[in-house]
Image (cartoon, grey):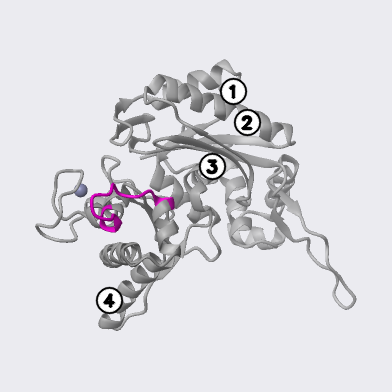
Amino acid sequence: MPITGDQTLLKQLNRMAIVRCVRQRAGQSRADLAKETGLTKSTVSLLVQELIDEGWLQENAIQITGALGRRPTPLVVDPSRLAMVGAELGVDFIHVVGVSLVGEIISYSKEPVVGVDPKTVLGRLGAMLIQEVAIVRDAGRKVLGIGVGLPGAMDEAAGLLKVAPNLGWRRVDVASVLRAALADAGLSALPLWMQNEADVAALGEFEFGDAPVRDPLVYLSLGIGVGAGIVVNDRLFSGAAGFAGEVGHSILQVAGPRCSCGREGCAEAFIGLRAVAQQAAQQGEEGPSVAALADRIAHAEPQAVSAAARAGHYLGVLMQNLWTTFDPGRFVLGGPTCELGAPMLDAARETLSRYARDAGVPMPEVRLSRYGSRAVAAGAAAMVLHKIVRPLQKTA
Ligand SMILES: [Zn+2]
């Protein structure tokens, strides 16, 4: 959104300040909001009425109490009339979701990706987004915008996917391709944002995780690659060139095992799915899939359990390093590796808590992602809300 400093922007700032207040603490009255925002009661009344008319807010049932009489009407976010559309472009699948203003997934679709040619893959992604917008609208909701999570480093302002190693893509202008597809479908007015997968998943947890969500929030995306999405001071921390959070290539062991990036001893060489599968493989066997590995763990096969626990231990070491860097209010773990379950997750917590005990400080909160395998798609939808309710926040 261009920053013009005119009345329209001022009004939008005030409107979204009200929405943020109600999202933070449901049930506030118009008088509470006037106090909280510093706006006059009449301005708040006017803007609240607009926000109710447009589907942002609703009035909760008025409480009548004998002694106190009629109490001020509590306002809450309206979960039923607006929605955001989000997508994850994975290495071999596309997830698309519609998400309500309170973070519920209201519709969902998934397709395998056939081929790796950017034009074909983005064509399919565009078609699925258009279809999802239609589904959400048919269900009687207005779509606020579209978000997309991509498996690589983004130049967010230009909409350029700089490099996606697992897709084999370099410098793909994702924004132009998707905007053209949306324009063809008459949807050029819908805002579109895109960002790295771990970053959008972090925004999903920041906007819709169980309250109270404490800042900074560090989301760890655990799969073949290992990455972090980091929210600091109410905004995504993406770095000078969009590479912040590439924690899979922080070094956990000097002269350790070789990583896919060419360095030795990276976190990914211990925690990445390929490394875990390799540890769990029987002699002469290819590394098993996540599902096969999870199945072996469920059957308490010692080699699989110990491979998962080893990965969990190194995950704990990685979290310790991130803890000292960011002092997070919350860690969130997501991605397919989480399916390895207790042996990995307990080992990670145990390692982190041992470091905490040694230092005599309380351990930070560690949670699993609210959205499981849909964390990126739901996070991409959350990014739309995150941007709209912060009209002054420029993209990096
Ligand atoms: Zn590496």
Asked whether residue 27 is in view, the answer is yes
Residue that badge 4 annotates: 355
Question: In the rendered view, would you say 211 is above or below 67?
Answer: above
Foreground pick, 131 / 365: 131
In front: 72, or 260? 260
Q: Nearer the viewer, mark 1 or mark 2?
A: 2
Per the model, the C-alpha gap separating discs 4 and 1 is 52 Å
Which comes before the other along the chain, label 4 or label 3?
A: 4
Q: Quadrant of the C terminus?
A: top left
Query: Magenta segment: does it hold 279?
Result: yes
Identify the residue under disc 1. 187
SS for dot 3:
helix
Residue density around tag 2, few if under 14, some if 14–19, many if 20 or more, within 10 Å: many
Label 3 Cα crowd, 10 Å radius (few <14 / some 14-19 / many 20+)? many
User: Mark 1 falls on what kind of element?
Assistant: loop
Boundaries of the magenta span:
278-291
Residue located at (37% from left, 26% from top): 116
Residue, disc 2: 133
Marks 1 and 2, the one that precedes in the sequence:
2
Q: Label 2, label 3: how many angstroms apart (C-alpha)?
A: 12 Å
Answer left or right for 348 relative to 78.
left
Front one among 206 and 271: 271
Q: Is residue 17 left or right of residue 118?
A: right
Q: Are marks 4 and 2 in contact (CB under 8 Å)?
A: no
- The alpha-carbon separation of the residues under discs 1 and 3 comes to 17 Å
Query: What is the three-letter code of the residue carrying label 3?
Result: Ala
